[in-house]
Amino acid sequence: MFAIASPRQSTGCQWSVIWNMSWPLVIATMSVSLIGAVDVQVAGLLGPTAQAAVGLAEHVLSMFNMLILSVGVGTTAIVARAVGAKNHSEVEYSTAQSITLSLFMGLLLSCCAAWSAHLIIPCFAQDPAVASQSVMYLGIYALYMVPFSLVCISNSALRAIGAPGLTVAIVLTELLVNILGDYATVIGNWPVAGLGIRGIACSSIAGAVSASCVAALCIWYSPLKLAFRKLLPISIDAAMRVLRIGVPAAIHGVTWALSVFLVFFILKAVHNPTAALASWAIGMRVEALLLIPLIALRLSVASIVGQSLGARQTAVAVRAGWSVAGIAVTLMSAIGTAVFMFAKQIVAAFSADATTIEYTASFLCFGAVALPFRGLDNALSGALQGAGDTRTSMWILLFTNWIVRLPLAWLLCLKLECGPPGAWMAIAISGILAALLICLRYAQGSWTKKAV
């Protein structure tokens, strides 16, 4: 019924399981990244103000989305554990309760985002024109969270049962509808002229609604079909079970996003803030593309580890985490070497300003050194998430970001006058430290006894 690695499988078979789980997730992750990139690119056709407004609103909403994604983290851990234990009733019930919980959260967060847009956006936008358009955009775009909640939980449950290929169909549907809608409303002035960024927001909602319909069909024609009969009544115990795993993941994501904003404030105080901020934005965008394979590996190992622990195959779970970590470190070492060697050539494709190129190249070089450690961190964090141990990653991120990264970036960047490279060094050091702490936690092995 479900896919799971057997303890008697050879190492080659385990590599096959990892590959079969990972490659669809690479496609899905790239598609999600492309959706956001196209939204911003099409908004650029309307001018820099519209582009900044869309980028800001989508970044703000992403912090709300992290709360829904946290339910997905809990869903994967619980459903995968039930799959491994061959408890089909629990698989269906946990999936159903997660769907109900996420839909409720999506509706609630949608209302909160739309209502608070005029309060949140001005905190991040100094230009009144950007703030005004961003508030308008977010007021519409907030509705995205309702269908997104069904998409998120469906993808999490399908990954947990070992069917990541179905998530590709869901995400590609959203990608196609979203992109067609962006170009039709902005360039084609369809269905009515002058929609502007409102058309981009509506296209995003249409894409999510279409994807949610495909997600419902995928659930209906999968072994999870009976979950639709168990959506109600909502169980407080089931909801709390998911949230106990998911909330630390949400705190992890939100605090990371907030720490990114604080780095911006540090860079605003350097000698050449315009070039510093531009290099930070470019460097983060390039880095996000480089990390796409790691996201796929993290999601896949979470399902494998959850299933293995559910089947009481602890050795398989532990070995899977180390195997994926080996793949991630090897892959990121190769990518990091290439980035280090060709940093300036990469940056030249994004900027012609000499100072910006210099700062961004140094960002990429420091990042390249830390990339293998980022691979180790992502792989083992994913394994711990699959086991339901999300608090460890949360506490490690809080320590390395808020106690190490930000104070060290302030010290090196401003007090010791190292400029932006000082901030890049602090980011690399905190990333390396986080990976070593995660590795230590994983090696201890106590996470294998975590109850979900």
Image: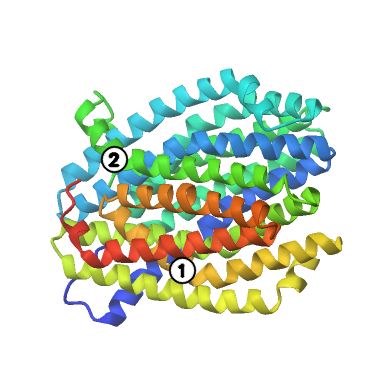
Say left or right for 27 vs 8: right
Q: Secondary structure at mark 1?
A: helix
- Identify the image quadrant of residue 420: bottom right
> Is the N terminus in the top left, top right, bottom left or bottom right quadrant?
bottom left
Amino acid type, callout 2: Thr
User: Which residue is at a point 23% across and 26% down the rendered structure image?
Assistant: 236
Amino acid type, callout 1: Phe
Number of numbered discs overlaid on the protein picture: 2
Mark 1 or mark 2: whose residue is earlier in sequence: 2
| Residue 83, horizontal then vertical, whole percent | 21, 53
User: Which residue is at a point 40% across and 29% down the rendered structure image?
Assistant: 103
From the image, tell me which residue sits under label 2.
95
Q: Secondary structure at mark 2?
A: helix
- Can you say whether 216 is above or below 449 in the image? above
Disc 2 crowd rating (10 Å Cα; few below 14, some 14-19, many 20+) is many
- Identify the image quadrant of residue 8: bottom left
Label of residue 278 in the image: none
Q: Nearer the viewer, residue 133 or 363?
A: 363
Q: Is residue 150 visible?
A: no
Say left or right for 105 vs 17: right
- Can you say whether 429 is above or below 160 in the image? below
- Can you say whether 450 is above or below 191 in the image? below
From the image, tell me which residue sits under label 1.
373
Given this view, does label 1 or label 2 mark the residue nearer the observer? 1
Q: CA distance from mark 1 to mark 2?
A: 33 Å
Q: Nearer the viewer, residue 232 or 269?
A: 269
- Can you say whether 437 is above or below 226 in the image? below
| Residue 345, horizontal then vertical, whole percent | 77, 73
Q: Nearer the viewer, residue 451 or 34?
A: 451
Disc 1 crowd rating (10 Å Cα; few below 14, some 14-19, many 20+) is many
